[in-house]
Image (spheres, grey):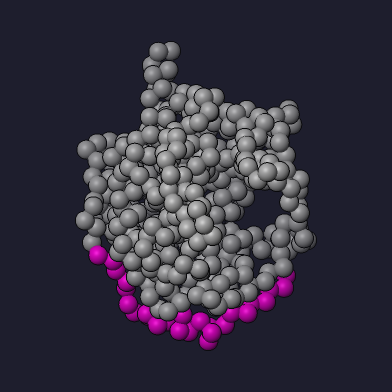
Amino acid sequence: MKKNLICFNSILFFLFTSCAGISPTVESNPYVYVSVDDNDYENMEALQLTKVMGNGINLGNTMDACGGGWIGFKKDPLEYEHCWGMPETQKVMFTAYKEAGFDCVRIPVSWLNAMDIANGDYTIDSRYINRVATIVNWALEADLFVILNDHHDYEWCALFGPEETREEAYRVFDAIWDQVGTYFKDYSYKLIFEAANEQWGAGFYHAFSIGGKDYTIDTEVSEWSSSAADFTAFQNKCYDIIEEIGQYYVDKIRAQGGKNDKRFLLMPGYDTSMTYTADRRYKMPKDSANEDIKKLLVSVHYYGPAAYSILSEDAGWANVANSWGTAQEVKEQNEDFAQMQRFTNEGYGVIVGEYAVAMLKQSDGTYVRKNDDIKWMTNVLDNCDKYNYCPLIWECNDYFKRGWKRVKISDWESQDVKCELGFVDSDVADLFKSRSYAVEKAALTNE
């Protein structure tokens, strides 16, 4: 397997050593949220947690929107919150989530927006983390569980791949999770930390850019273009790195004190793929602080088949699909979900952190729902009920309207305007309302 690394330590010297020996810190959190029922969760097992978390929703394309490359870094948090077309987050949105039948929300965050690591500034801007805290608090106040992660910060994560740049990757990793973990360490146990998004796996080796500098890490390896032997060897390296980082992450969070010693931690799967994560080469970290109780969960995403669930229009690799539900397609989806029993059988919780059906793009540029989307989502949720996984739909003001939408008024300006709040279509609303933990608990009680 050929690997060319055009990204030498000498090039990266200033980028990653200008703050050597310095631990960046943000101001203490003035917004700490403590739940009155925290004792219920302190000694709760991961498999109990996924049951009471019911089903959830993502606050997508919001705090995870990456604007550092063109907005700049450490700007007004609302500039990033708006930059992918989402409205300003409002407290009422979380109340609406709860009323719609959701019991948890995932708040993806791209922390590099609030740092300037290319210029040696590893401190998260206090305005940004305070804004995240405000949003987290609104969700907790609405009686939702919250998953908080490091989302679209893919660029620096590629430094974990080559051994010669791994130390630098750990510096960024430390900067993020030392600050975020400490800032939220006294929060309710209903706040769950997710170490990363989809970047653990093949994301350890890819081209990237930081601060206007481009770096290329070319493995010339993929599942489709490489020999089976080369791809297996490549994956073995990625699995080893995941095991190393995962253990480092758990040890780091547990050592921070506060409620982090018993906080539920969500570990990203390999590419968050069910198949790759269910592979025995993927190993969950040890949690020495909780040897007698399982506090770890694993995160996977589900977008299959891709032509149906991901594509809105034809692409070079596939034509968009506008139907789903043949016997073979249902069988394949069921088999995908069954794989993750590997973890529940060992006492680990499983979070399906993202799933969705893409909207279909029309010739006039508008988007409409695809055929069979209710059938697809129903089968996903049925599988999650069957195996006690917690699913969270990826949502960006499509099925569920946030009460506001971002509207472009000129080439350079947009503004928020009022719109519906909640599910627009009754069939979707009925699907999720029936899946709340309260409804399912009542159904079990009445049996």
For residue 262, above or below residue 99 = below
Question: Taking 435 as reference, is 115 above or below it?
Answer: below
Residue 438 occupies quadrant = top left
Residue 177 at what x, y percent from top left?
37, 62
Q: From the viewer's perspective, is 359 left or right of 111?
A: right
- Residue 299 seen anywhere in this rendered image of the structure: yes
The reply to whether residue 279 is in sight is no
Q: Give the range drawn in magenta.
A: 1-27
Judge whether 201 appears above or below 404 on screen: below
185 on left or right of 411: left
| Position of residue 376 measured from the top left corner of the image (x, y, whole percent) | 62, 32
Closest to the observer: 221 or 62?
Answer: 62
Looking at the image, residue 202 sits to the left or right of residue 320; the answer is left
| Residue at x-position 51% and y-position 69% | 69
Magenta highlight on residue 224: no
Relative to 243, is 178 on the left or the right? Answer: left
Up the image or down, 245 lies above or below 97; here it is: below
Residue at position x 72%, y 73% in the image? 2
Q: Work out which quarter of the rendered image holds the C terminus and state it.
A: top left
